[in-house]
Image (tube, grey):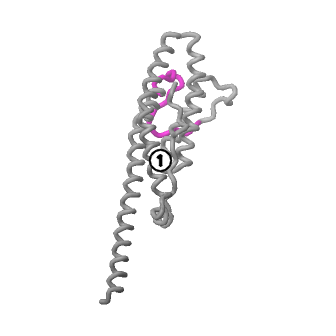
Amino acid sequence: MTMFEWGVALAALLGLFWVIGAYNRLTRLRAAVVDRYGVLDEILTRYVLWIQGCLPDDIRTDFSTQPAPLEPTAPPDQAGPWLRLKASLDQYLQAIAQARRRPLDGDAMAALVLAHATLAAAWAGAMQDQQQSEAELTERQQLRRARLLSQCVPLRDAYNEAVKTYNAAITQFPAWLLARMLRFRPAGNLVRLALES
């Protein structure tokens, strides 16, 4: 072999090693995002279970972590605050299930943020309704909710940091070539997921 052939072989070998290394790095970063979401998902599921337990007995149905199909009851404008809370809880469960299946998908994360905001608004309406009759219980529930949500804050931030690192990695040259070939898309973040009470 001539020096030129050795040079070409060495360059091809270095290129192959680079591709393998870049692929492994992107795969690790994707796995980190999925892992971070998995931990956050556990706390969000605990939050959902707790809210389900706060529903009045006549509204609560058999609960699983999978959303139940909504049955038409009363029109939304005539439904009480607890029925709105139940409906928004079902929507939130669907958003969590979608995000669980696709934790790197921006649309799934946007749906989760929207469902969380809807649930927070429905919760506020239910607490306002309950406060008229049971002020002490309402205060305890608000404190418990604040504690649950405060547990989510560092997990949300860790997820967002993993997403930021992954998104930065797939835009860096020359790794973006590999990311485009493998159709790795930027992951969606939860920056707008308001967890503060």
From this view, report whether residue 30 is shown above or below residue 75: below
Q: Quadrant of residue 90?
A: top right
From this view, report whether residue 131 is shown above or below residue 101: above
Q: Main secondary structure of the magenta part?
A: loop
Q: Is residue 41 left or right of residue 3?
A: right
* Quadrant containing the N terminus in the rendered view: bottom left
Q: Quadrant of residue 125?
A: top right
Residue located 43% across and 32% down the image: 152
As for residue 22 lying within the magenta part, the answer is no
As for residue 67 lying within the magenta part, the answer is yes
* Residue most extreme to the left: 1
Q: Amino acid at mark 1?
A: Lys
In x, y percent, where is residue 44? Answer: 45, 35
- Residue 87 in view: no
In x, y percent, where is residue 143? Answer: 46, 18
Q: Disc 1 marks which residue?
A: 164
* Residue most extreme to the bottom: 1
| Dot 1: element | helix
Q: Residues within 10 Å of mark 1 (few under 14, many from 20)?
A: some
Residue located 56% across and 13% down the image: 131
Judge by depth and name the residue closer to the eye, 10 or 69.
Answer: 10
Q: Is residue 120 left or right of residue 158?
A: right
